[in-house]
Amino acid sequence: MNLASEVEQYLPRQILELVAGISQEADRLGQRTYLVGGVVRDLLLGYPNFDLDLVIEGDALRLAQQIAKTRVIKLVTHPRFGTAKLSCGDFTLDMATARRETYAKPGALPTVMPGILNDDLFRRDFSINAMAISLAPNNYGELIDPYHGKSDLEHRSIRVLHPKSFSDDATRILRAIRYEQRLGFKLETQTAQLLERDVPMLRTISADRIRHELELILREKYPEHVIKRLDELGVLQEINPSLDYNGWIEGKFDKARKLSRSRQLPSLYLCLLAYRLSEEENEQLIHRLNLPKKLACILHHTLRLKSLLPLLDRPAMKHSEIYCLLHEYNPLAIQANAIASGSPLARSNLELFLTKLRYMKTSLDGEKLKGLGISPGPELGKILQTLHKAKLDGEVKTKAEEEKLALLLKPREEEAEGTQTKITKQNIFGESSRPAR
Ligand code: ATP
Ligand code: MG
């Protein structure tokens, strides 16, 4: 089957030109170039996908370096793996030397040897991801499909290429469910049996690789569908025994999508996934995924704030009080609580903080207070805090009102001691409300 005209229609001009340049150069060097993996699958399905993977029968690194010499593109090479990444504008193009892989033991990183295209396709996860399109001049556009991926696409079926696939690399369990749910496909019967058999093999997978696959799941359009299936198949519990789906997540993820910017969504989903865990279970999850410090901290904040929610479940709270309770928490942790909390009052207080209070600033700053004759030092800091509190509570609105209050608070030489005590009492931004670090 020849897909030359589909390729020409599908790929943007800019990518086509680059790809044509690569295959001509490869031909000159006596090498062959193929489009492989997700882009071939999505081209046949008619879905956009401009993260291109090229496999080279030859030497991908040398070819990439040759191409980068004559074009304005960014090149990053990984000589150890024989791969190179070219970036240009919005798209990336990964180039890899065709390789053969063997697994010394389950979950180990594979031993890699140079190979031909068919070896490279055989090392892949599923038949629908194991197709290639030739870019060589003499058979440009030809579909190479030794494992019947096109037929599986037509039957909407996810199928592994051999019975040891999931045990060799159990991340494929997570990938299978991700594609099944994204594409609305079914696991082929034997693949489903192998998957269920090999769920315990997830224990052989490193934290970083599990985290990577979970991140890919949380980047899907509807990750809750994937999580539901992972739960049904016992995969979620294999990652952490306390994780479950039970329908709660569905509405919460939907709400998250409506409220949050897409870049932050995966982290927000993770907070919601962990929301019903105890602090101890949360620690286990953080460890199992080897979460980076920042994300671990967001999860800590989420659960700590959850335990503070009763304090926010009150009507007519002073804005400064809400600010005091929340200002040191990560905004994503606050957002997660605003989505997850069952209390409408707590929710509206959290939302008020996120949408308004956290942005409210006084017109006066330290420099301007100095201009009013207030000397630098702890007193000045306290006056600023008092002004901020007054601003939050609507007691001062204009810059002139702030100045008036600042002058009232300004310690007179002979009363410095007394004023200090008074302001300290007014200061509600105490240490006690801070989340312990
Ligand atoms: P997506 O649209 O999710 O990016 P993709 O098919 O492009 O799908 P990638 O994760 O970008 O998926 O991987 C590119 C290709 O590498 C896949 O199509 C698949 O052939 C192969 N691959 C990725 N991970 C594995 C794995 N764990 N085992 C075998 N092959 C894999
Ligand atoms: Mg991809």
Image (cartoon, helix red, strand yellow):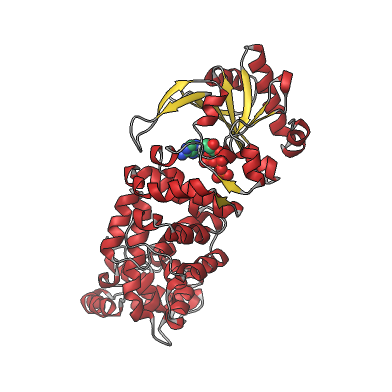
The x, y position of residue 222, in whole percent, is: 55, 59
Up-down: is 37 above or below 352?
above
Q: Where is residue 337? Give x, y as percent.
A: 42, 70
The number of callouts visible is 0
Q: Residue at x 78, y 33 (%)?
A: 5
Depth check: give the residue in front, 412 or 153. 153
User: Is residue 22 positioned above or below 326 on the image?
Assistant: above
Horizontal placement of 124 versus 32: left or right? left
Q: Is residue 90 visible?
A: no
Image quarter of residue 146: top right
The residue lying at 28 percent from left, 76 percent from top is 412
Q: Quadrant of residue 242?
A: bottom left
Q: Quadrant of the N terminus?
A: top right
Considering every residue shown, the one lying at the far top of the view is 29
The residue furthest bottom is 315
Q: Is residue 224 left or right of residue 143?
A: left
> Quick one: 53 or 318, which is closer to the camera?
53
Q: Is residue 141 above or below residue 271?
A: above
Q: Which residue occupies 52% across, 30% down?
A: 122
Q: Is residue 6 left or right of residue 360?
A: right
Q: Quadrant of the C terminus?
A: bottom left
Q: Position of residue 423 (x, y in %)?
A: 29, 77
Hey, which quadrant is residue 95 in on the image? top right
Q: Position of residue 434 (x, y in %)?
A: 29, 68
Tell me what residue is drawn at x 28 percent, y 56 percent.
284
Is residue 425 in view?
Answer: yes
